[in-house]
Image (tube, rainbow, N blue to C red):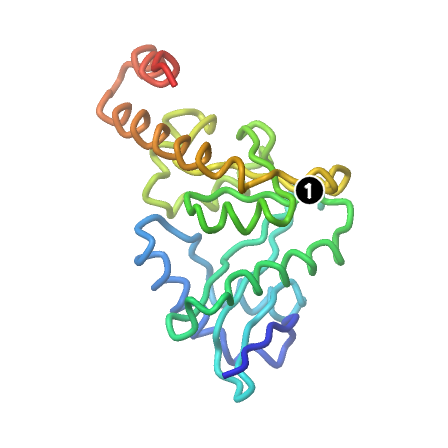
């Protein structure tokens, strides 16, 4: 069955319930978290055309993603990328990712586009588009941005390290340097190893309570 991706509009409001249900199901399946959103929030994104939605030719819901704006349009995040379980493993996530990415550049051509993820699949999708791994200090520094992580099961790791490190990898697309793409094919093993190292170090640090100096030593003193 053919599935197409469209820029959202008010006619798609009838899919809000399915979108929210799929977001919740996806978060549980990943074991991490996707920022929970209200009915009103998703409706607003759909009506303002700040989202894309994937539908079959018969109008069956298949996937979704939306745009969030931070620091007066200096930064964007392509959030909430979901694919309904009935339409997985057919390349739809990549199709949605490309659609929301192009929509972001169309609406905000000078904005930097940010991603934080634990998923190697998302890392691959993003780096193929020109994102590069960055430190958390290069991400938006507003409370609104980081509040989006509050529903993730790893949020305590982020807060204990003062937002300097987590199990996620930070990625950034800068339109001024978009021609210099990060070569994922050569670096995928490095990113995989980095993810494992971060998990090992930070999960050990979780056992250390009330002693910041010891915790920092466990993070930065480990040979990698």
Q: Secondary structure at mark 1?
A: strand
Q: Residue at x 48, y 83 (%)?
A: 60
In this rendering, the answer to whether 177 lies above or below 84 is above
Specify whether 97 is left or right of 60.
right
Residue neighbourhood size for the residue with mark 1, other residues' Cα within 10 Å, grouped as few (<14), some (14–19), many (≥20) = many
**Residue farthest left in this picture:** 207
Residue displayed at 40% across by 67% down: 22
Count of residue discs: 1
- Farthest residue in the front direction? 186
Give the camera-side residue of 164 and 93. 93
User: Residue at left 41%, top 63%?
Assistant: 23
Q: Is residue 109 left or right of residue 161?
A: right
Looking at the image, is 16 positioned above or below residue 117? below
Residue 144 lies, in percent from the top left, at 54, 42
Residue 180 coordinates in the image, percent (x, y): 71, 37
Q: Position of residue 221 (x, y in %)?
A: 36, 11
Q: In this view, which residue lies farthest toward the bottom?
A: 58
Q: Which residue is more in the foreground, 119 or 11?
A: 119
Tell me where residue 156 sits by quadrant. Answer: top left
The residue that mark 1 highlights is 112
For the C terminus, the quadrant is: top left
Give coordinates of residue 3: x percent, y percent.
54, 78
In this orientation, which residue lies closer to the viewer: 211 or 200? 200
């Amino acid at each position: 069955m053919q599935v197409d991706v469209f820029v959202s509009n008010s006619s798609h409001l009838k899919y809000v319930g399915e979108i929210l249900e799929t977001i919740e199901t996806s978060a549980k399946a990943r074991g991490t978290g996707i920022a929970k959103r209200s009915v009103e929030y998703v409706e607003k994104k759909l009506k303002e055309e700040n989202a894309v939605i994937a539908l079959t030719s018969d109008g069956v819901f298949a996937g979704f993603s939306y745009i969030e704006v931070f620091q007066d349009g200096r930064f964007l995040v392509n959030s909430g990328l979901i694919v309904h379980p009935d339409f997985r493993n057919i390349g739809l996530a990549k199709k949605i990712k490309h659609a929301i990415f192009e929509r972001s550049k169309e609406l905000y051509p000078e904005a930097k586009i940010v991603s934080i993820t634990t998923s190697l699949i998302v890392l691959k999708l993003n780096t193929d588009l020109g994102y590069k791994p960055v430190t958390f200090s290069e991400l938006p520094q507003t409370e609104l941005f980081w509040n989006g992580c509050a529903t993730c099961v790893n949020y305590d790791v982020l807060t204990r390290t003062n937002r300097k490190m987590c199990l996620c990898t930070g990625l950034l697309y800068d339109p001024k340097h978009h021609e210099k793409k990060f070569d994922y094919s050569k670096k995928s093993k490095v990113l995989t190893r980095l993810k494992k190292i971060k998990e090992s170090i930070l999960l050990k640090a979780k056992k250390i309570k009330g002693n910041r100096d010891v915790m920092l030593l466990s993070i930065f003193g480990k040979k990698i």
